[in-house]
């Protein structure tokens, strides 16, 4: 069977038109943000600089791509069409008449669809893992910086211990198929996923402990929601069967949180040590507020600027880490469409075919670049105040 | 100062002890030992034979005893030959002793590599030498380029040069080694054909043709970060009083930058460059695997993939040592360079 090809110009047009839900969503969101930017505080200020607009645009582009992945991609990312093996970009699949826009890889899968579906994996794991790392880092960094002394010494030593590990060695030790037979990943998950519950419980308790009408609702919600997700993620025993995570994804998740929380810890600790000397902290201490109230409601809100910037950079860094994991074939399934795995598969065949390598590399690079630009312009805006 | 360094060295030793214990624990998990036994025996071995291999090679001794043996605080016991009942060598290819001897890390014996069938020292140190050459080339490219970019950008904050260079350095920090490696290979090896996409021949002799791509790939990720730090430091220095005084004295802009600003602006990047080493270590692994260069990173991946216990321990010891010693050098060096800082 002879495979027909589209011209380069048609391919570009076709790619742009396949992203139609993304363009519509982008226009709506960017337009609305631009119109109401005066009322949107820090987020609105991003639209004052070109760098900020580009950063927000790229991040939103990948966010919407992940959301609308099933509409955008013409093929199933795992489906193999034998005739399309190593097909060049623009090849028309004879049966359905649809186009392999970026060609086919060595297993005859559509590179374009795989790139689009790959964004889903990255955009779920990277922000979520960063969120957990933030929770762990904040919950441990605040007391270390505020109390100092023994707690600080012990926690800092542990953080430095993890930071002294080269990331790649850590992954080779923590993300292996063998380790899934041992309770280690589940134990680590059990510890890490406890932190958000502790964090929010303490947060609400310190603020509303004298207001029974609020405290019971908030604490109850935290414990029920947190407990439900906790049971679903750690033990995979969600009674409603909604929260579920694959064992190897849990393993990756835990390893990434483990590798990036000491960094957050160090930043939070440093910020806390700086902020605790301010007058408003002294005022709160004189009022007789509890230490945890001061940490969570006086210090933390004033440390938010650097933390938001760091979170943006950290999501990018986590994306790079996920790519590294995929590149070494650790954790993710070998047929998984994530960008790192795709780069690994394609880079081995660079001598014969280059087209399967470029889409995932450019996708990963542009997403991290978007996050970095976003972080940079956030930093600039927060410095202006 | 001396007591500061001594205390830091003490913490360092403790950290290394803890980390090697953790690594030792993780690679001696039951599934990993099974994997090792399967790879070391012939195909289709029964579970009893695997168990027999593990016991026969001393892997069934107490965990802490074995850790002590590896450290060199407990004597390494020879194994007993099941057929003759006499003491025998654990691994014949490493010349293991037949009588109990203290030979661990403290005595300079890093153990025996089961994957490469030789002693760890004879595998690890040549690999480190190869990586040392790579690292040297990378630093020789990365440091001058990034400092130059940072200084040019920070010299006049907000100018067109500044904005262009800043965006370029942000872009370079967004390109991890496996991305830039692929892109550079596509451009320089596949399209232009100027450079070799593999550095496998670099073990015999390093040429511009086979060594440029790995060096470029490794350098590009660090350049952006160091350049941004240099820029921030330069911007800060340029707003200082003494710069304005020098300008008002009538010195030319060039003279102010070269004579007054540069030296003060280069203190902070020194720390950043030293702290780049842990990142470079990860980059080295990726680049060496990607370009098939037989160095430390390649050895680490082989050791980890085959669960080569002693070799992996040796690798982690080396990498942790590099990370900690560069931290120490950066702290001490910072205090020397900046007289305003005094370490307690």
Image: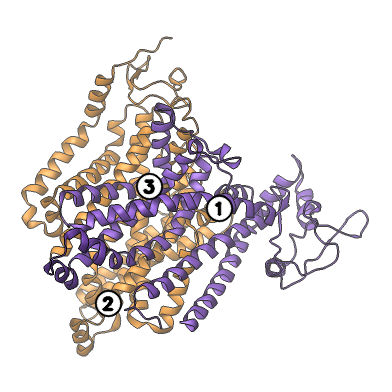
| Chain that appears purple | B
According to the image, label 2 marks what residue?
Answer: A274
Chain identifier of the residue bearing label 3 in the image: B
Q: Is residue A243 among what the camera can see? A: no
Quadrant hosting residue B292: top right
The residue lying toward the viewer, choosing from B80 and A25, is B80
Q: How many marks?
A: 3
Residue B245: give x, y in percent of width and height.
15, 71
Chain identifier of the residue bearing label 1 in the image: A
Give the quadrant of the C terminus of chain B. Answer: bottom left
According to the image, label 3 marks what residue?
Answer: B220
Q: Nearer the viewer, mark 3 or mark 2?
A: 3
Badge 2 crowding class, 10 Å Cα cut-off, few under 14, some 14 to 19, many 20 or more, is some
- Measured in 3D between alpha carbons, the distance from the residue under mark 1 to the one under mark 2, in whole angstroms, is 42 Å
Residue drawn 48% across and 62% down?
A188
Mark drawn on residue A180: 1
- Measured in 3D between alpha carbons, the distance from the residue under mark 3 to the one under mark 2, in whole angstroms, is 34 Å
Question: Eyeballing the image, is B196 above or below B97?
Answer: above
Q: Are marks 3 and 2 in contact (CB under 8 Å)?
A: no
Residue A283: give x, y in percent of width and height.
18, 86
- Measured in 3D between alpha carbons, the distance from the residue under mark 3 to the one under mark 1, in whole angstroms, is 36 Å
* Image colour assigned to chain A: orange
The residue lying toward the viewer, choosing from A58 and A166, is A166
* Image position of B200 (left or right of A379): right
Question: Eyeballing the image, is B106 above or below B191?
Answer: below
Q: Are marks 3 and 1 in contact (CB under 8 Å)?
A: no
| SS at badge 3 | helix
| SS at badge 1 | helix
């Amino acid at each position: 069977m002879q495979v027909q090809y589209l011209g380069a110009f048609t391919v570009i047009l076709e790619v742009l038109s396949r992203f139609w839900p993304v363009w519509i969503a982008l226009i709506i969101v960017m337009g609305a943000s631009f119109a109401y930017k005066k009322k949107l505080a820090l987020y609105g200020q991003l639209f004052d600089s070109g760098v900020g607009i580009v950063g927000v645009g790229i991040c939103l582009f990948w966010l919407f791509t992940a959301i609308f992945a099933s509409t955008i991609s013409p093929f199933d990312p795992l489906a193999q069409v034998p005739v399309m093996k190593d097909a060049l970009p623009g090849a028309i699949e004879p049966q359905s008449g649809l186009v392999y826009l970026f060609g086919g890889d060595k297993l005859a899968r559509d590179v374009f669809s795989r790139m689009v579906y790959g964004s889903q994996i990255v955009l779920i794991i990277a922000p979520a893992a960063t969120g957990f790392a933030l929770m762990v880092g904040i919950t441990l960094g605040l007391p270390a910086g505020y109390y100092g002394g023994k707690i600080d010494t012990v926690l800092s030593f542990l953080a430095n211990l993890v930071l002294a590990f080269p990331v790649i060695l850590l992954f080779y030790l923590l993300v292996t198929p063998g380790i899934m037979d041992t309770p280690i990943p589940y134990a680590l998950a059990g510890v890490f996923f406890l932190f958000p519950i502790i964090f929010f419980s303490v947060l609400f308790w310190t603020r509303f402990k004298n207001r029974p009408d609020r405290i019971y609702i908030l604490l109850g919600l935290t414990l029920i929601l947190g407990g439900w997700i906790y049971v679903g993620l750690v033990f995979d025993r969600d009674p409603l069967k909604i929260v579920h995570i694959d064992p190897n994804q849990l393993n990756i998740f835990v390893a990434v949180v483990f590798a990036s929380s000491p960094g957050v810890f160090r930043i939070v600790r440093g910020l806390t040590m700086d902020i605790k000397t301010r007058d408003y902290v002294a005022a709160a201490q004189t009022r007789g507020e509890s230490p945890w109230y001061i940490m969570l409601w006086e210090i933390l809100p004033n440390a938010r600027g650097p933390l938001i910037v760091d979170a943006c950079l950290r999501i990018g860094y986590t994306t790079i880490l996920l790519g590294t994991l995929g590149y070494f074939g650790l954790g993710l399934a070998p047929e998984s469409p994530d960008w790192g795995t795709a780069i690994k598969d394609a880079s081995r065949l660079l001598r014969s075919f280059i087209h399967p390598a470029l889409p995932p590399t450019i996708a990963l690079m542009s997403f991290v670049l978007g996050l970095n630009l976003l972080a940079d312009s956030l930093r600039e805006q927060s410095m202006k105040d | 100062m001396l007591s500061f360094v001594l205390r830091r060295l003490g913490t360092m030793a403790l950290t290394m002890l803890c980390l090697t214990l953790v690594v030792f624990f993780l690679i001696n998990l039951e599934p990993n030992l099974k994997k090792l036994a399967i790879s070391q025996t012939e195909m289709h071995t029964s579970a009893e034979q695997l168990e027999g291999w593990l016991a026969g090679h001393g892997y069934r001794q107490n965990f802490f005893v074995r850790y002590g043996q590896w450290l060199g605080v407990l004597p390494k016991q020879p194994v007993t030959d099941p057929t003759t009942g006499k003491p025998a060598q654990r691994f014949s290819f490493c010349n293991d002793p037949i009588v109990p001897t203290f030979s661990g890390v403290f005595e300079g014996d890093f153990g025996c590599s089961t994957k490469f069938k030789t002693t760890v020292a004879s595998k690890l140190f040549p690999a480190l030498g190869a990586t040392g050459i790579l690292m040297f080339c990378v630093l020789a490219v990365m440091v001058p380029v990034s400092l130059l970019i940072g200084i040019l950008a920070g010299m006049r904050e907000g100018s067109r040069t500044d904005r262009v260079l800043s965006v370029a350095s942000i872009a370079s920090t967004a390109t991890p080694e496996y991305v830039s490696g692929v892109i550079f290979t596509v451009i320089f090896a596949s399209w232009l054909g100027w450079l070799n996409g593999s550095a496998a021949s670099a073990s015999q002799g390093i040429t511009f043709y086979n060594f440029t791509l790995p060096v470029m790939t490794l350098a590009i990720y660090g350049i952006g970060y160091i350049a941004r730090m240099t820029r921030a430091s330069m911007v800060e220095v340029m707003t200082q009083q003494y710069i304005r005084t020098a300008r008002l004295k009538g010195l030319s802009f060039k003279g102010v930058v070269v004579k007054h600003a540069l030296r003060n602006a280069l203190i902070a990047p020194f720390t950043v460059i030293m702290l780049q080493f842990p990142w470079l270590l990860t980059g080295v692994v990726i680049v060496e695997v990607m370009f098939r260069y037989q160095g430390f990173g390649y050895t680490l991946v082989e050791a980890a993939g085959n669960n080569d216990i002693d070799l992996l321990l040796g690798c982690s010891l080396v990498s942790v040592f590099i990370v900690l010693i560069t931290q120490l050098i950066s702290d001490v060096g910072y205090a020397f360079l900046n007289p305003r800082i005094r370490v307690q």
